[in-house]
Amino acid sequence: MQGANDLAVLLRAGALPATLTVVEERTVGPSLGADSIRAGVLASVIGAALVVVFMLAFYGMFGLVANIALFFNIVMLIALLSVIGATLTLPGIAGIVLTIGMAVDSNVLIYERIREERRRNGRNVVQAVDAGFRRAFATIIDANLTTLIAAVILFFLGSGPVRGFAITLAIGILTTIFSAFFLTRFMISEWVRRRRPKELPKGIRTGMFDGINFSFMNFRKISFIASAVLVVASVVGFGTHGMNLGIDFTGGSVVQVESKSGPADIGQIRTDLNGLNLGAVQAQGFGTDKDVLIRVPAQDGGANAEQSAISKIRTALDSSYNFVRVEVVGPVVSGELSRSATIGVLASLIAILIYIWFRFEWQFAVGAIIATAHDVLLTIGIFVLTGSSSISPVLPRY
């Protein structure tokens, strides 16, 4: 009886009305989702095709081996994503495309090391292949671990879409290392064992740069001055003009609508929305002549005010337009994302600094961090100059 009474109390307490406030909302219509999938798949196919052609042309048979390893690398990546039940997002597809490019990085390092051992050190093909894999291993591990550090930090500090990118990138790094040092090595070892070659396979890359003696350091003063000027200009531009931050950092709403019949009347949309007292609402063409992107600034009154603004827009445009995409970010979420982004960048730099410091020497660590900070500042300068509102993660590569 006592247990039944306790259960009844719990059930009655659970039935009490509770007011929920939507602090972040992202809605994607089926047509936009299908278009995004097609665009992502197309980008992956184009990227893979260009990489395949490049490797075949530059490295001949070794390029064919790299392409086979790349195919199995992508298969393993997709298989692991399926096994862990990861949700594939657009940033996740971007992670797959990035993995395609990064996967052949390892092969290029190995092949160039093999060529170096053969050409400069005078080793035979068997010795050159063995030394090439052995000496490239540490370089590839260091390069991929620094990127993995950034991916892990992105996962723990990022939001949903960013976490999807981080998971895909991290798994892609692991499959890349596996395919480079097991699958690629196995295929090349079998080629050496069966064919007993006297020379390495030829391609466009063979000897392309071997006879060039260009002293880049002769231009170091000009390069340093140009970099310093650009970095100072980026900092000044960021401090005075600022960046065109997206709603993830500023709060507000983004609505994409599609005309139900004929081209969209952007002027009429602006007239209808300006009468809603929602602030400086922006409407611009997006994609086809039937699509319009509407940006609504953050509303005073918190998250409920954001939802009220979306309701007003739906009431004003629902008769003539289909709502393809709606994104609403409240002030609380945008503030948390800003803090997370700042902490993520600083944490990545510190973690990589510590890794390189222990792995090599402190001079290399300081140099790597200065180079990374230089790249980040120049990237910010480009965003300030172009007025772009989307910020992509800058992943360090060494």
Image (cartoon, rainbow, N blue to C red):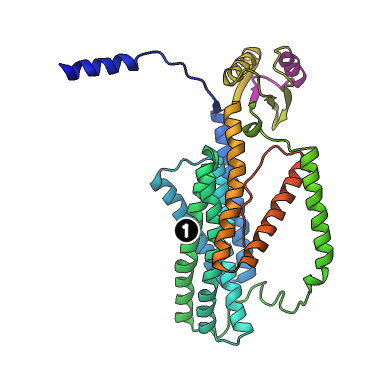
Residue 31: percent from left, percent from top: 57, 30
**Is residue 101 toward the left or the right of residue 211 in the image?**
left
Closer to the camera in the image, 395 or 128: 395
Tell me which residue sits at (52%, 55%) in the image.
148
Number of residues whose C-alpha sits closer than 10 Å to that of mark 1, classed few (under 14), some (14–19) or many (20 or more): many
Residue 368, quarter of picture: bottom right
Q: Which residue is mark 1?
A: 175
Closer to the camera in the image, 244 or 101: 244
Is residue 86 rendered magenta in the image? no
User: Does residue 213 sit above or below 368 in this rendering?
Assistant: below
**Is residue 137 toward the left or the right of residue 384 in the image?**
left
Magenta stretch: give its range.
256-274
User: How many numbered callouts?
Assistant: 1
Tell me which residue sits at (62%, 37%) in the image.
338
Q: Can residue 363 be seen in the rendering of this structure? A: yes
Residue 60: percent from left, percent from top: 60, 71
Residue 3, quarter of picture: top left
Residue 250: percent from left, percent from top: 66, 31
